[in-house]
Image: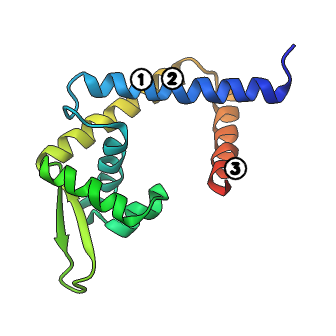
Amino acid sequence: MQTFRETINNLLEAVFHNILRVEEEYLQKGLGPGLTIREMHIIEYVGKGGKEGRTLSEIASFFKVARPSITVAAKKLEEREYLTKNTSLQDKRVVRVTLTREGRKVYLSHMRFHTLLANELEEDLNEDEKQTLINTMIKMDKYFEKS
């Protein structure tokens, strides 16, 4: 019989890999040809910033990576016409990144994908299970945020 730790480890590993697999399959079905999952998540984060977009520093902080890594990724996405980089008029040191028309299409499609996943999961759970899942995921998020 598996211990709690073994069971949780196996489930976390399986869920993580299944989420990546499902997202990769979705990306391969024509959503932003050639986009990696990381690039898609950058587009998603920028899209959630609305018309203002995000600064390169905000993106780097959110993904917990060095700013030069995001600068390189943003440049690639700009070359592929998903993002536009603009220097702030108020502070020339600040570069804001916003979505292009193509970037918005990919962002909206990805958000529909997430909504479909959530809808399918919701259909399989009763109210108590939904609340338990939400509470557990909040605790997991806090744990991983601290790690």
Q: Secondary structure at mark 1?
A: helix
Relative to 130, 55 lies left or right? left
Answer left or right for 65 relative to 53.
right
Judge left or right: residue 137 versus residue 44: right
Q: Quadrant of the N terminus?
A: top right
Task: Specify the amino acid type for callout 2.
Answer: Asn
Q: Residues within 10 Å of mark 1 (few under 14, many from 20)?
A: few
In the picture of the structure, the residue carrying the numbered disc 3 is: 143
Query: Mark 2 — residue?
Result: 18
Helix, strand or loop at label 2? It is helix
Distance of mark 1 from mark 2, alpha carbons?
6 Å
Residue 112 sits in quarter: top left
Residue 144 lies, in percent from the top left, at: 64, 49
Of the residues shown, which amino acid type is indicated by label 1? Val
| Front-lying residue, 119 or 90 | 90
Q: Nearer the viewer, residue 53 or 122?
A: 53
- Circles 1 and 2: CB atoms closer than 8 Å: yes
In this view, the residue in front, 26 or 137, is: 26
Label 3 Cα crowd, 10 Å radius (few <14 / some 14-19 / many 20+): few
Residue underneath mark 1: 22
What amino acid is at disc 3?
A: Tyr
Q: Against 51, is 6 above or below?
A: above
How crowded pointer 2 is (Cα within 10 Å; few <14, some 14-19, many 20+) is rated as few
Dot 1 or dot 3: first in sequence order is 1
Residue at the (38%, 28%) spot, across then down: 23
